[in-house]
Image (tube, rainbow, N blue to C red):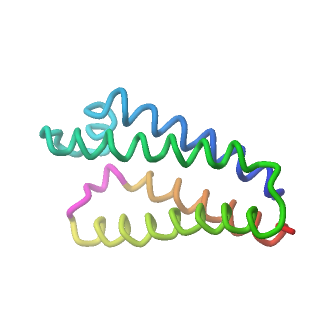
């Protein structure tokens, strides 16, 4: 997996989920089987704009090389790895409904994409 392709895919994914969380937080949270009190909507929108920012970093960094490229890829990998750990724990503990389990698979796939990209980063 080329680092450029990984960053393009990461940008598209981050933009799509970030936009959905920002514009339709109740629908996104409900899709994962979560309730949507005002506090959850506020946090979903905050997560959404953060993902839009990550998408922008990925898009603008797709032609990076050297240490800057490795830093962008490592940051993306950290996001995916930490999401896997946190969501995995929440699923096992029962605080995240099983309906949200496909989200864990998405993080595993993106994590693998960024691992493969890091092996090709120069």
Residue 94: x and y in percent read 21, 65
Q: Residue placed farthest to the top in the image?
A: 23
Residue 16: x and y in percent read 52, 35
Is residue 99 in the magenta section?
yes
In the depicted view, which residue is nearer to us: 1 or 91? 1
Q: Quadrant of the N terminus?
A: bottom right
Which residue does the image show at 26% across and 37% down from the upper left?
Answer: 30
Q: Which residues are magenta?
A: 95-100
Q: Residue placed farthest to the left in the image?
A: 37
| Left or right for 111, reference 85 | right
Which residue does the image show at 71% across and 50% down from the upper left?
Answer: 7
In the depicted view, which residue is nearer to us: 109 or 15? 15
Q: How many marks?
A: 0
Is residue 35 in the magenta section?
no
- Asked which quadrant contains residue 116, the reply is bottom right
In the depicted view, which residue is nearer to us: 108 or 77? 77
On screen, residue 34 above or below 71: above
On screen, residue 37 above or below 27: below
Q: Quadrant of the C terminus?
A: bottom right
| Left or right for 17, reference 24 | right
Residue 48: x and y in percent read 40, 41
On screen, residue 1 above or below 21: below
| Left or right for 31, reference 49 | left
Which residue does the image show at 23% across and 71% down from the upper left?
Answer: 93
Which residue does the image show at 71% across and 44% down from the upper left?
Answer: 60
Residue 100: x and y in percent read 35, 51
- Asked which quadrant contains residue 77, the reply is bottom right
């Amino acid at each position: 997996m080329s680092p450029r392709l990984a960053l393009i895919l990461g940008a598209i994914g981050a933009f799509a989920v970030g936009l959905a969380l920002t514009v339709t937080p109740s629908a996104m949270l409900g899709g994962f089987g979560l309730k949507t009190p005002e506090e959850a909507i506020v946090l979903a929108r905050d997560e959404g704009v953060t993902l839009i920012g990550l998408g922008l970093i990925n898009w603008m960094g797709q032609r990076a090389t050297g240490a800057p490229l490795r830093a962008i890829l490592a940051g993306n990998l950290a996001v995916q790895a930490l999401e896997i750990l946190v969501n995995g724990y929440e699923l096992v503990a029962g605080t995240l409904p099983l309906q949200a389990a496909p989200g864990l698979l998405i993080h595993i796939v993106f994590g693998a994409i960024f691992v493969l990209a890091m092996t090709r980063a120069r």
